[in-house]
Amino acid sequence: MRKSFLAFLVFGFFASLLIFGTMTSHAGAANPSTSLDKLEKRIASFKPDQRYRDDKAALVTLQEAVAAAKEGNYGIGACLVNEKTGEVIQRGRNRIFSPYFRSDLHAEMDTLTGYEQRVKAQTPKVEGLVLYTSLEPCPMCLARIITAGVKKVYYLAPDPSGGMVHLFKNLPPIWQKIAEGRIYEPAQCSPELKDIANKVVKYSSKMLDERLKKE
Ligand SMILES: [Zn+2]
């Protein structure tokens, strides 16, 4: 009886060592900063797949998303692209927390503001421009996009908890009317890029949660 109890204790000790070891090594692998570096490598080595219309522009949004995450912001990027030529006209990224707190600088807002400030036109000059963003636009950004006059928006990852595109019918009627005939859809890009878009947001949110808890 005593022997089997001892064996149980010894076995329990080694088993817990094994479990703890697995947990810590798993925690190491899930370090958000290391994970971001890995995503950056996946982006750098990715070759756009010609079967997917939006791979090139999607890749640009992800380069911006990782840059945002590394600066201490939410990992979301965006760009404005000339639909006919494929030329990237403006790039932007989330800049909410860094270099200093700006409640308006979501990636889409940063992109549109950068473009408007550069063009300095009296009326919207977005004809033929498509907005790409790595995450489904939130209510604030969707309203801004509608106001800016951009007629096509493609996003890489859906945002079930914060996105507004899937709740389009909940916009006030006048906003829906202005947006009539415009396109807000998931991007036609490689699944690999959608996966990266999701993960950049996930890891950067984790890093920010940890940082904000300390402040
Ligand atoms: Zn937004």
Image: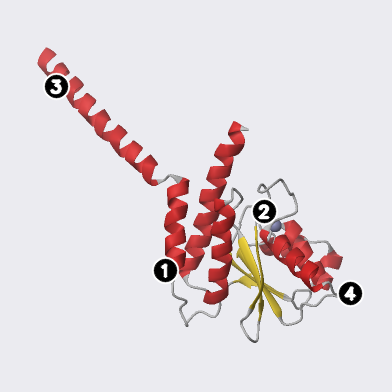
Residue mark closest to the camera, 3 vs 2: 2
Could you tell me which secondary element the residue under label 1 belongs to?
Answer: helix
Bin the neighbour count of mark 4 within 10 Å (Cα to Cα): few under 14, some 14-19, many 20 and up.
few
Bin the neighbour count of mark 1 within 10 Å (Cα to Cα): few under 14, some 14-19, many 20 and up.
few
Lateral position of residue 185 relative to residue 127, left or right: left
Query: Quarter holding the N terminus?
Result: top left
Question: In this figure, which residue is indicated by the disc labeled 3?
Answer: 7
Tell me which label, 1 or 2, sits earlier in the chain: 1
Determine whether label 3 and label 1 are within 8 Å by CB: no
Q: Residue at 67% across / 48% down in the picture? A: 99
Tell me which label, 1 or 4, sits earlier in the chain: 1
Return the mark for residue 69. Answer: none
- Tell me how far mark 3 sits from mark 2, CA to CA: 57 Å
Tell me which label, 3 or 4, sits earlier in the chain: 3
**Relative to residue 179, is residue 98 depicted above or below?**
above
- Tell me how far mark 1 sits from mark 2, CA to CA: 25 Å
Quadrant for ligand 1? bottom right
Residue mark closest to the camera, 3 vs 1: 1
Amino acid type, callout 2 = Arg
Query: Quarter holding the C terminus?
Result: top right
Question: In this figure, which residue is indicated by the disc labeled 2?
Answer: 95
Question: In this figure, which residue is indicated by the disc labeled 4?
Answer: 122
Determine whether label 3 and label 2 are within 8 Å by CB: no
Q: Picture coordinates of residue 12 (x, y %)? A: 22, 25
Q: Residue at 78% across / 62% down in the picture? A: 143
- Tell me how far mark 3 sits from mark 1, CA to CA: 52 Å
Tell me which label, 3 or 2, sits earlier in the chain: 3
Tell me which label, 2 or 4, sits earlier in the chain: 2
Query: Between 61 and 5, which is closer to the camera in this rendering?
Result: 61
